[in-house]
Amino acid sequence: MEPTDYIKLLSRWGHILPAVILVGGSIFMQTTLIPALKDSDDANDVKGKIKRTWAKVIMICAGIIIISGFYNAYIAFKGDPKPTPIYHAAFTAKLILVGIVFYVSSLLSGRSEVAIKFQEQEAKWGKINMMAAILVVLFAGLMNVAPRVARDIPNSDNSSRSTLMAPETTTVDINSTDEG
């Protein structure tokens, strides 16, 4: 592996792990925590303590996702083979949904007057946030398998061509024998 491959790998991990934390946290809160606290006398006190901690997690994860996301997008768009319109559409949808998830998450865990007013409909917005977070993961999967197109390569007759290519994969012939 080249040194730049290690940077790409760290950036990928730095993008995926915080996303897993945010998506998993969103699902946990909506499917387990909020329903369990619904009938509790201490619900507001417990929610307040959890939100203070969760707000810090959201900020750290969002920061890491944004930084690694810029780097990953730069690598994806400058590389060869280049992304196709399917990739661009999935990227755009994912970017919009990520903005929604960050915004709703910050309001659901915030302490400002606007956030407190927003939290009056916590169940509704939490479910919307959870669904948006799940869609982010699904669009990321689509981006990962979207076909790529080779950059224009000049021929000897000065024309150019494009070739449709699958995402980066390695093919191994298991039937070949290497005797040497």
Image: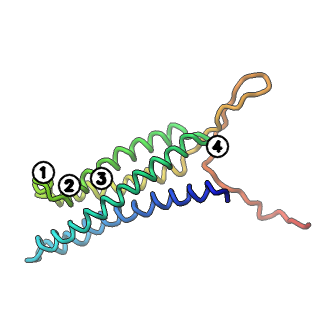
Residue 56 at what x, y percent from top left? 28, 63
Of the residues under marks 1 and 4, which one precedes in the sequence?
Answer: 1
Residue located at (72% from left, 23% from top): 159
Circles 4 and 2: CB atoms closer than 8 Å: no
Marks 1/4: CA–CA distance: 48 Å
Q: Give SS at disc 1.
A: helix
Residue furthest to the top = 158
Horizontal side of 155 relative to 28 (left or right) equals right
> Which numbered disc flags the more N-terminal residue, 1 or 3?
3
Residue named by callout 2: 107
Neighbour tally class for label 4: few under 14, some 14-19, many 20 plus, Cα within 10 Å = some
Q: Amino acid at mark 4?
A: Met
CB contact under 8 Å: marks 1 and 2: yes
Of labels 4 and 3, earlier in sequence is 3
In this rendering, the label closer to the viewer, 4 or 2:
2
Label 4 or label 3, whichever lies nearer to me, is 3
Closer mark to the observer between disc 1 and disc 4 = 1
On the image, numbered disc 4 is attached to which residue?
165
Q: Which mark is residue 114?
A: 1
| Quarter occupied by residue 112 | bottom left
Measure how far apart labels 4 and 2 are at the Cα level: 42 Å
Mark drawn on residue 180: none
Q: Amino acid at mark 2?
A: Leu
Residue named by callout 3:
102
Secondary structure at numbered mark 4: strand
